[in-house]
Amino acid sequence: MPGPSMFFPQRRARRGAALTLVFAGVLATGAAAGSWSADARGGQKPTEARPPSRTAARPAGEAVDEAAAEGERLVDRRAVEEAAEQAEQDGKSGAEAAAEVVGRTGDRWSSVYSSHEYEGFERALDGAYIGVGLSARRAGDGRTEVDGVRPGGPAERAGIRAGDQLRTVDGMETAGRPVTEVVARLRGDEAADEGSGAPAGAGTPVRVGLRRAGRSWERTLLRERLVTESVVVERLPDGQAEGPAATRIKVDSFTRGTGERIRRAARAAARGEGILLDLRGNSGGLVDEAVTAASVFLDGGLVATYDVRGGQRALQARPGGDTVPPLVVLVDGGTMSAGELLAGALQDRGRAVVVGTPTFGKGSVQVPSRLPDGSVAELTVGHYRTPSGRSVDGRGIAPDLVVRGDAERRARTVLSGLRGGS
C-alpha cells in the first residue's frame, strides 16, 4: 500500500463510482481510468487560487499551533476504523459505515475505496491502468464528450476524436450521469461496484455509442493495459521569436520513478542552455517523488514541512543536486499538490523563477488505512508548507511572473535573462 500521497483525484466520501485518478490531464481518473478529464471531476472546476505573499520562515511553534487548529478538523482515523469494525460485526458494510463517518467531516480529500478501486489507484501510482485510452468531460448541456484520446490506444485506433459526443457505454445512456459512473462503465468496474463480479481486465470488450456532426455510430473497443509517461523531455531549439534554446521537462504527475526520470533528463540537458520545468496541469502524486525531484536541483536543505495531528515534520532534499543550470518553472491553475510542493520549494529556496498563473491550492496529505473488509480509507493527516512557512492549502503558489498568454515564450525570455542574455 503506498505511503503519503498528494494526488488530486476528486475525492469521494462514499463508495460507488470507480476510482479514477485524474492525472489532471491524465491523472488519475481520467488517465488512470482511461477516461475522465481535468475539468470534469464531479462537475467541479478548480477554484481560483488566492496568491499568498512571500514571507520569511515562521517560528516552528507558530506553525505547530496553526497545525493543531487544523488538526481539530481532520478525520479521526480511529473513529473510521471503529465504525467499519462495528458494521462488520452487525453484518453490514464496513466501507459504507466508514464512508458515512468521513462524509460527516466535510473533508473533500478523505475518501473510502473498495479493495479493487484501490488496486486501480496503486496501478495508477505505477503509471499503469486498464482502459480504452480516452478522457471524457461533462459538456455544458449535460452531455458527456470525449476530451482527448491517447495516441495509439484503442479509442484512437477506432477513429474516436476529441469533441465526439459519448452517448452510451455498453447500452447505458451517459446523459445526465456523473462522469465517475461513465468512467466505471468504460473501465468495466460496474460489476465489482455492485458486488456481482470482478472488474474487467485487459482484452475485455466495451461498446460505446458516439455522435459527431449529426452522425451516430457504435464501436466495440477492447480494454488494454496502458502505461502513462509521467515525464516528457523535449529540446527547444534557439528561435529569435520563441527565445533561446532550452530543455523542457514536462511532468504530468508524480508516479513511482518520476523523480529519477527528471534527474536523468536534467543530466542530459545541454550545459548552459537552461531548463524549463513544466508543471502545468500536474495532478500531484507521491510525496517522495516530489522530494526526489527537488533533490535534482537543490544541494540538500528543506523542501517542505507538514503537520500530522499537531506535530511538525520536515522533508529534506538529498545533497548533491545541480544548482548551476538556469531554471524556470511553469505552473497554472491545474498544478496541484505534489506539483505545488515542488514549485514552492524551488521558489522559496531561490533556485527557480516561477512563471504562469496561480496554482490550484491543494496542500493536504493523505495516508491510507486498510479496513476489516479489505476496503481502504484514505484520510487527510495534515497539511504541508513551503520552506518559508507558506500554507498552500486553499491558497496555491503565486508565480513570480504572472503570465496568462504565451507563458512558455515568456519563460524562455526569463531563461535568457538568467543566462545573462547569452
Image: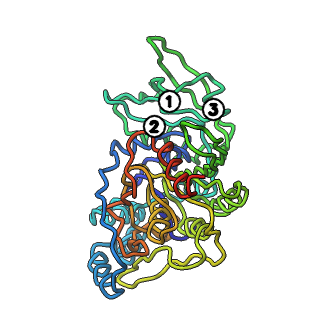
Which label sits on residue 169? 1
Looking at the rendering, which quadrant does residue 379 occupy? bottom left
- Dot 3: element: strand
Which amino acid lies under the numbered mark 3 shown in the image of this protein? Pro
Which label sits on residue 205? 3
Q: Report the coloring of the rendering.
A: rainbow
* Direction bottom: furthest residue: 61
Which amino acid lies under the numbered mark 2 shown in the image of this protein? Val
- Nearer to me, 58 or 373: 58
Residue 285 image point, x, y percent: 52, 60
Mark pair 2, 1: CA separation: 7 Å
Identity of the residue drawn at 58% across and 49% down: 250
The first of marks 3 and 1 along the sequence is: 1
Identity of the residue drawn at 39% across and 75% down: 388
User: Horizontal placement of 159 versus 374: left or right?
Assistant: right
- The residue tagged 2 is 182
Packing grade of label 1 (10 A; few <14, some 14-19, many >=20) is many
Residue 100 image point, x, y percent: 32, 62
